Image: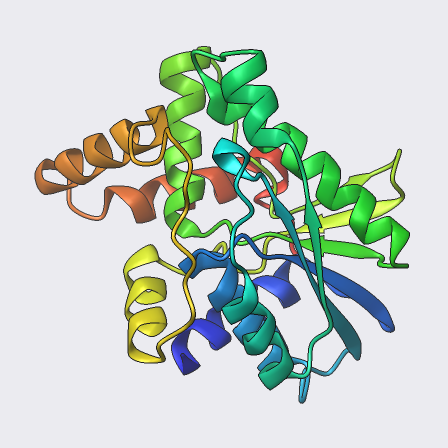
Amino acid sequence: MQKLMGQMRAAMERYQMVQPGDKIAVGVSGGKDSLTLLAGLAKLRDYYPVPFSLVAITADPCFGGVETDFSPVEKFCQELDVPYLLRRTRLGTIIFEERKEENPCSLCARMRRGILHEMAKANGCTALALGHHFDDAVQTFFMNLFYGGKLGCFSPKSYLSRQELWLIRPMVFCEERDIRNASQRLQFPVVKSACPADGCTSRKDTELLVTALEKQFPDLRKKVMGAMQRAGLDHWGDVS
């Protein structure tokens, strides 16, 4: 976990993700990524040179009309001394039953993000932290190229002018394998997703492709990250 915290701190400092007195909402889905992000930020809160506070927020999609049991996450937040807010939604019903989306992931992500934005603002937060990591960034680059015909990626830090809210991704230097290992070793209370599309997505296909390509082209992921930073693609080249 120390390695991940060091990488998180490096990203936060490079991209100036935190300002003095920030109240950061951490989007917690119950997956390993968001729980690792929450645990890392909770520890960094104690000694990071820029003071900030935290609140954890969850938007439950209620897939199949069933509420997810997030009580293990709530207990985890209590142990970390982080307030926890949970909102039940109809996302699962809207996307899979009413709209019957053939490609549900993009719409679900946008709608869930909108709910998290609202929750963050309603609770006086100045920033929303999401658990996207190093591998997510590389995969997003390839997905934009293969599916959209463009060069692009999400930004490490961006400002949402309508919500007057900063969107930050402190784990962009953290590799998924390290996150997985830490989550398992520290026994984070991962809540299994009930999404019908889980594991059958374009992102999963891209992940498998990148893994296969890296066998032929060593360090491909690091080279892609370096290229995005050197090109200044979507603010990846920004430095403090």
Q: Residue at point 50% right, 49% down?
A: 132
Horizontal side of residue 228 vs 206, given as left or right: right
| 162 in relation to 95, above or below | below
Question: Whole-percent x and y of residue 137?
Answer: 45, 41
Q: Residue at point 49% right, 57% down?
A: 30
Q: Between residues 172 and 227, which one lies in front from this camera angle? A: 172
Q: Is residue 16 visible?
A: no
Q: Quadrant of the C terminus?
A: bottom right
Q: Residue furthest front?
A: 66
Q: Residue furthest bottom?
A: 47
Question: Whole-percent x and y of residue 18?
Answer: 75, 65
Q: Is residue 95 visible?
A: yes
Horizontal side of residue 229 vs 238, given as left or right: left
Q: Residue at point 65% right, 32% down?
A: 90
Question: Whole-percent x and y of residue 77?
Answer: 61, 75
Write down the quadrant of residue 65 in the picture: top right
Write down the quadrant of residue 47 in the picture: bottom right
Horizontal side of residue 159 vs 99, given as left or right: right
Q: Quadrant of the N terminus?
A: bottom left
| 226 in relation to 93, above or below | below
Q: Residue at point 35% right, 35% down?
A: 198
